[in-house]
Every structure is written in C-alpha cells, then in structure tokens.
Image (cartoon, rainbow, N blue to C red):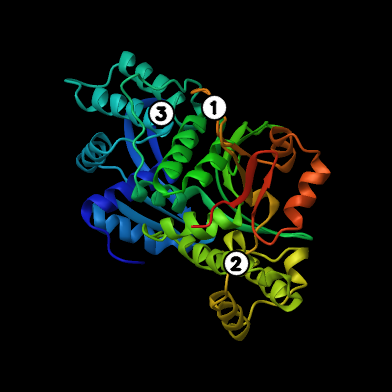
Amino acid sequence: MKKELNKIQFIQWFVGFAEAEGCFKIKPRYRNGKIISFGFEFEIHLHADDFKLLEYIKERLNLGNVYLNTDRNACNLTVASEKELCEIIRIFDSFPLNGVKYLDFQDFKEAFFLYFSRKDTISQDLINKLLKIKEGLNKGRVDFIMPQHHKINITGYWLAGLIDGEGSFSMTRGLQLRLCFQLLFTAAQKPLLDAIKTFLINNLEFDRFSLWKLENSSVIGIFEIKAKGNSKPTVCLEIRNVRLLHNYFLPFLFNFPLLSKKNLDLADFLVLCQTVYKGLHKNIFIRELLIKLSLRMNDFRLSSYRKDSESATRTDLTTDEFAKLLAASLQSTEETSLILVKDVIYLIRVIELEGSSLVADTETEFLVDSLKEASKIVGVHYSKFRKSLDYIESNEVKLNNYTIKRVPVFNG
C-alpha cells in the first residue's frame, strides 16, 4: 500500500473502485421449491492476489467479511447483514456512483427497503416485485437512462479507484513499441468516459497549444467497439501519446495512489514511458529489456498465470537487468525526448504591413495541425513550404506576409 488516505479520500477511492468491481445482489432463498425469503449482498470479487486489498477495504470500512478461495484463485469481500448494508447504502447516498452502477444501486436500495420495511410475512406480490428488480440488475440491465438529477462528479481519488479496478497499462511488442493507457467498459458507459476525458483536459494543466491539439484530435481518444459473437459492444478511453503520458498524465496520477496490485503495473509503465520518451528504446539491448518488462505486467503478473507460446520462449527480466533499465530511464538528458510530426502544430500569424489596415473581424492568427493546411493558408505550394521550414535552424519562417512557427505540444 502507498500513503494512507484520510477518510474522505478513501471513500472517494472506494466508490471509484466499486464502480469498476462492486456488485449488488438480490438472492432468493428456497425451501421445497418455494421462495421463503431474500438475501441482499454487496460484493467485490477479485483475483486471490488482491486478498490483502480486500482486507484493507474491510478494515477501513469496518464492514463485511473477506473470503479466499484458493481452488479458484479468487477472493471476495461480502457485506450481507441488514445493519452493514444500511451503512453501504449511506456511503453510496453520500458519495454517489457516477456510471451505470448507480442504476443498479438505486434498484438494489429500492428492493432492500421494500423487503425490510414490510410489516408481515413475505407476500407473493412482494416476491414478484423483488424478482423483477433482480432480473434487471447487473448483466440483466437493459435500461441505462440516468435520472435527470444525477450528476457525474469525478475527483482524482475516485478516478484512481476506477483505474485500480478497470485501468490497463500496456505496451505493444511489434515493430514499434507503443505505450497505452486504457479504460474499457460496455457501450452504455460512454457518457462516463466522456466525463473522464473532460476531467483530464480540465485538470492536467495543459498549455493553450496542447489544449488546441486535444480539442482537434483523438489524442485522448474515446472509441466504440462493435460487439462480436455473444459479447456486448464496448467503449474505451485511450491515451497513447508518449509525451502526454510522460509529461502530464503519469505525474498527475501519482498524486492519487493506486491500492491494488495495479500500482506495480503503474511503476513498470513509468519505466517504459521514461525510456521511450527519451528515445532509448532504439537501442537493441534496451528494447529487449523493455519487452521483458512488459511481459511481467497485467495478466502476466498474476500468480496463476501460465506462460503462453510467446512468453514461454523468453527468460524473465532479472533483478540486474531491471536495475540497468531503471538507471537508463532515470538518466539525465538534454531535451532528447522524441518529438514526432503528430506532436507539432503550426502557429500562423499575419504580418501587419506598414500602411495596411485590417478590418476588425479579420483573423490574424491561425492554428493548424499539418503542413498542408498551413501551406494553403499562406498560399505557398506544399513542397516549397516544407523546404522553407526544413532549411532553417529555428522553428519560425516568414512567407507571403505571414510568420509560421512550429510549436511542439505536450511539452509539460
């Protein structure tokens, strides 16, 4: 675990984590084929490797019981008593869930109070009401319309909890090494991912040129993925730009500790990001170490993981190799970070010539994303325009009464 969170910080983290991993259950109890009562549960179900995390949550909430199932490599925190579920309900009323799970909670709460506020034995009418609510919970939900009064409220600690549950830090291992942070949900959660994107844009302290790039590109992208087979359509938020990850997102995220084993993935991802950011991955030896490091992240990290054909042929990253990689990622360099074409925009300003008069609504400044767009505004053929920029030492040139400047974005 990292630094201890105060009560408010922990509850915000917990609500975010419950958004990803929590589950509300209504369980009919039978005797001789007939329903005689109902049980209600709030549960968090995780891999056995996160058993200590569930113990920590239980200790902080002072609620529920933690169970370990070694045969299934699983563990779960279960809150099932009427008294303790009242406290869970109080928490989620005070710090509302932001996504679709808010609807599950509201239905669960309705069923809970219907059941425990009854004055006599359970009636068939009540049984039918509870069964109907149960059918619409979790994977059975078909209505995803949020009530008008519901407002999405994202905080850094809530986001850290969500990332602890559903976030992914990874690196593709093809011809190019590409880093990616991702949040993946069912398609109904798109409004939540839109809100997270807005939160990041508003809180990562981007300069005005980087903000323009964000507003005119998918650098923080939200992509919808069609259903395949029996699966449901999904939606994901992705950040793949190394400069954005290194200079903005990771420094921000380290202010809000991850509490699950995902904090180990985050630590390794930082090493990957620092190394690629500095261009050191072009070294064949460093590249091989980066690949080895990536093969101990995510599912590869699980105690129950069985090596597949790809990873079985590779030796694990040794302590000495990791030390060398860490040293390389931390070495001080003078502006050797990789700046790609996609990390540059063009600032074009009109030169006010002596004796000329510009009407008040004439644009005197333009921002564009490519050389071709810039060349059209300036009125110079693309190839000539490109040569003019390539042959100068500075990032600024004057052409046709315009100054054109290359502006790197996501510099931090």
* Dot 3 alpha-carbon crowd within 10 angstroms: few under 14, some 14 to 19, many 20 or more: few
Q: Label 3, label 2: how many angstroms apart (C-alpha)?
A: 59 Å
Q: Is residue 262 above or below residue 158?
A: below
Judge left or right: residue 91 versus residue 14. left
Residue, far right: 383
Q: Earlier in the sequence, mark 2 or mark 1?
A: 2
Helix, strand or loop under label 2: helix
Query: Is residue 319 positioned above or below 384 on the image?
Result: below
Task: Please rate how many residues cluster around mark 2, counting C-alpha atoms within 10 Å: few if below 14, some from 14 to 19, many from 20.
Answer: many
Q: Residue at x 41, y 28 (%)?
A: 32
Residue 357 picture quarter: top right
Residue at 48% x, 60% y is 262
Amino acid type at circle 1 is Ser
Contact (Cβ within 8 Å) of mark 2 with mark 1: no
Q: Amino acid at mark 3?
A: Asn
Lower position in the chain sequence, tag 3 or tag 2: 3
Q: Amino acid at mark 2?
A: Leu
Question: What element does badge 3 sit on?
Answer: loop
Please tell me which residue is depicted at 35% across the width and 25% down the height of the picture: 107
The residue closer to the viewer here, 178 or 49, is: 178
The residue beneath circle 3 is 32
Circle 1 SS class: loop
What number is the disc on residue 110?
none
**Viewer-nearest residue: 186 or 88:** 186
Residue that label 1 marks: 357
Q: Which residue bears the numbered disc 2?
A: 272
Q: Can you see residue 47?
A: no
Q: Position of residue 255 (x, y in %)?
A: 36, 59
Mark 1–mark 3 CB contact (< 8 Å): no
The answer to whether residue 251 is visible is yes
Residue 225 picture location, percent across and down: 65, 34
